[in-house]
Amino acid sequence: MKSLQFSASPFVFLMIFSLSSAIHANEEFLHCLSSLHPQDSSSITSLIHTPNNSSYSSVLDSTIRNFRFATPTTPKPLVIVTPSSVSHIQSTIHCTRKHGLQIRTRSGGHDFEGSSYVAQVPFVLIDMVNLRSIDIDVENKVAWVQSGAILGELYYKLSQEADTLTFPAGLCPTVGIGGYMSGGGYGLLFRKYGLATDNVIDAQLVDAKGRLLDRTSMGEDLFWAIRGGGGGSFGIVVAWKIQLVPIPKTVTLYTVNKILEQNATKVVHQWQSIAHKLPIEFYSGITFAPINIDGDGVTKKTVVASFHASFLGTIDELLPIMQESFPELGLVREDCTEMSWLQSILYMGLLPNDTLNILLDRTHQNPLLSPSFKSKSDYVLEPIPEAAFEGVWERLLEEEAHSASISLIAYGGIMDQIPSSATPYPHRGGILYKIVYSVGWPAEDNARSEWYVNWTRRLYSYMGPFVSKSPRRAYINYRDVDIGVNDENGKTSYEWGIKYFMENFDKLAQVKTMIDPDNFFRHEQSIPILPPSSKMEL
Ligand SMILES: Cc1cc2nc3c(=O)[nH]c(=O)nc-3n(C[C@H](O)[C@H](O)[C@H](O)COP(=O)(O)OP(=O)(O)OC[C@H]3O[C@@H](n4cnc5c(N)ncnc54)[C@H](O)[C@@H]3O)c2cc1C
Ligand SMILES: *[C@@H]1O[C@H](CO)[C@@H](O)[C@H](O)[C@H]1NC(C)=O
Ligand SMILES: *[C@@H]1O[C@H](CO)[C@@H](O)[C@H](O)[C@H]1NC(C)=O
Ligand SMILES: *[C@@H]1O[C@H](CO)[C@@H](O)[C@H](O)[C@H]1NC(C)=O
Ligand SMILES: *[C@@H]1O[C@H](CO)[C@@H](O)[C@H](O)[C@H]1NC(C)=O
Ligand SMILES: *[C@@H]1O[C@H](CO)[C@@H](O)[C@H](O)[C@H]1NC(C)=O
């Protein structure tokens, strides 16, 4: 025992040292925070959660959407602050800086790599849950939405106050406004109205100096950068002013499932050159997943391709278009369902449709989504050869892929019209479709995470020849640390930045250097500071 203690002592010493300095920083931070709010010290106290408070774990766990980052060894924040005013954000930034800590900002917690609530350094978590007001101006078709609101709250409020209007946002109601807007944000209406951030007209941001800026005071370059340059780089966005868009009374959805034995491969191959040319009223996608089928009393594993679409119009309007442009799908009236726009959100989000209140439930854990997951993304510019899909099916039939899925989302429409430099999101013209690969597993299987994650890496490597190249593009809101991360020593090629932002990365780095020269807002894939007059190594 004694010798063990002795031999372990340098390590134990280091641990105790860093632990006690963390506790020290923590106490100083708390002191700093309450000293800045002497008048309402009682109210700020109730918004600070230390590991001593029972609220700490409930707040922390409330929006962890990927249980890969909810293990006992996942690094936890020293303190969680749930600000209810801009001044709380300003003083949290001030005190965090003063005591040499870092900040992570969380709105809806859907970050694929947990970057909004996990860090390898001592950090303070700002959780935006209490800043989620939504103010709709029906007459002018605009709204102010705070970052802590979730998409479902926005859809719900719009349906109550402006039922002919909506906002072109995403499919999953629990996604947070803050992160979603920061990375671009696509959804059912993106081929008609563009990304969510294409419809942002003003914003409120607290920068590293604690200043509250709006579009006028931040200037057009910073306003450009926060609309797609990714969260956690430029400051904390408190609220977004959005442009609302009209929606028709009726939308039509269809799903057509084809397994490999029903010539799915051929139809998938054809879809690639058809879907991006469909009218802008269409959102069109395919999801591949492994499935067990019964044939002659024996269970057999195969792959199902689910062709789905959402169409702004009626079945009668949809059918002739599909029969003309994509007869091979064999779509019939019985495959289609008419519903309201709001019902279509529930339907696509796989939510029960008997009450709209489900849209307000920010902690709703969809039973069909995997608790733990790893995802990666690709963009396709040329149709993938039919034979190449055989390799995809092989991988989907592997053991690791029991809860895997691959989704193809058609591009085209207005995305072809908007210049790639209009916002930091560059993947616009010439894209046929985007792919997202996901593998999931139950939380009890977290010990085998690497086994599952390896599956996505093998698949990604297999897909290399068939997808965009130089760079191989990726979607920032589908964060993937495999494509590269910031190196604390500055010896990084920023390959990941080029993949997400292409030629816009350079301007993002310039804006970052201007607004946050000390690199206070940083994480594994935050926009880096440029050394003066340096050329980026591409
Ligand atoms: C189930 C699911 C469905 C999804 N569906 C879609 C979809 O349909 N369309 C789509 O485009 N994407 C979709 N995504 C991806 C999603 O857009 C991103 O994960 C997005 O970043 C989530 O935002 P959040 O606020 O929930 O995440 P968070 O994890 O809270 O934040 C994500 C990133 O933004 C930063 N951030 C958060 N809030 C702020 C703020 N106020 N100011 C500055 N930085 C901030 C965080 O620090 C982090 O880096 C989906 C993700 C999941 C898990
Ligand atoms: C956390 O604990 C402290 C000290 O016991 C207390 O003053 C504070 O009100 C608690 N905060 C919350 C959010 O419960
Ligand atoms: C947490 O509680 C421990 C013991 O109960 C105490 O020593 C410590 O100061 C407390 N920390 C904070 C931040 O309140
Ligand atoms: C699949 O394609 C083959 C060859 O084109 C055809 O003979 C067969 O009927 C098709 N099967 C289905 C289920 O459509
Ligand atoms: C709600 O879901 C049920 C079951 O899936 C379905 O039968 C019903 O048609 C749906 N209602 C609407 C309005 O979509
Ligand atoms: C994952 O892949 C790496 C590299 O190919 C390999 O070394 C490792 O053993 C794999 N891990 C698991 C759990 O399969």
Image: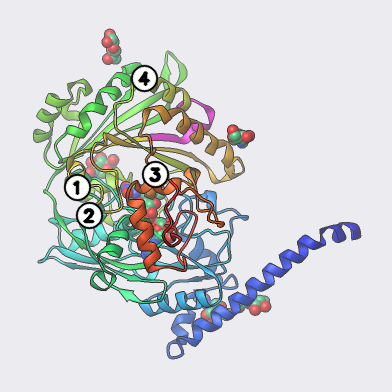
Q: Mark 2–mark 1 contact, CB under 8 Å? A: yes
The residue identified by callout 2 is 198
Residue at the far right: name it: 2
The residue identified by callout 4 is 260
Real-space CA distance between mark 3 and mark 2, rounded to the nearest whole angstrom: 20 Å
Given the image, on which type of amino acid does mark 2 rest? Asp
What span is in magenta?
396-406
Q: Is residue 92 visible?
A: yes
Given the image, on which type of amino acid does mark 3 rest? Lys
User: Is the C terminus in the top left, top right, bottom left or bottom right quadrant?
Assistant: top left
Q: Secondary structure at mark 4?
A: helix
Judge the density around disc 2: few (<14), some (14-19), many (≥20) Cα neighbours within 10 Å.
many
Q: Secondary structure at mark 1?
A: loop
Circle on res. 5: none
Q: Secondary structure at mark 3?
A: helix
What's the colour scheme? rainbow
Which mark is first along the chain, 2 or 4?
2
Given the image, on which type of amino acid does mark 4 rest? Leu
Residue 354 or 189: which is nearer the viewer?
189
Which mark is first along the chain, 2 or 3?
2
